Image (cartoon, rainbow, N blue to C red):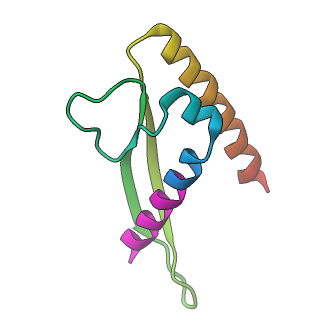
Amino acid sequence: MADNFALALQKGLRTRLAATSDLTNIVSTRIFDEPPQGVTFPYVRFGDITPAAFDTDTELGAQVSIGIECHSRSASGVLRLFKWWKLLNRLYTVRKRM
């Protein structure tokens, strides 16, 4: 059951990332589970996804850890992705506190 939560989270994150113009201005549509051979840089890849059941007596649930990797071959691309990543991290921290 935890795998269903992981898949739902990954789909939701991919949709959200693809709708984030600050990111798509850098990577276009290159957001992958597994990048194809000869992929154009920069791109974003989902890393390890680790679901674990977190059910209670009355509710089904899961704790899901997911990695998001940013790949670039140029220093300027790395810097742009790093700035985007810092923004994403701030947004996550704010939402986590709510």
Q: Position of residue 9 (x, y in %)?
A: 50, 61
Q: Residue at x 43, y 10 (%)?
A: 74
* For residue 33, side relative to residue 17 (left or right): left
- Viewer-side residue, 98 vs 91: 91
Q: Main secondary structure of the magenta part?
A: helix
The quadrant of the image that shows the C terminus is bottom right
Q: Position of residue 39 (x, y in %)?
A: 29, 30
Residue 69, quarter of the rendered image: top left
Residue found farthest to the right: 98
- Viewer-side residue, 90 vs 8: 8
Q: Is residue 26 above or below residue 5?
A: above
Q: Residue at x 74, y 52 (%)?
A: 95
The quadrant of the image that shows the N terminus is bottom left
Q: Which residues are magenta?
A: 1-13
Q: Residue at x 41, y 31 (%)?
A: 43
Can residue 50 be seen here? The reply is yes
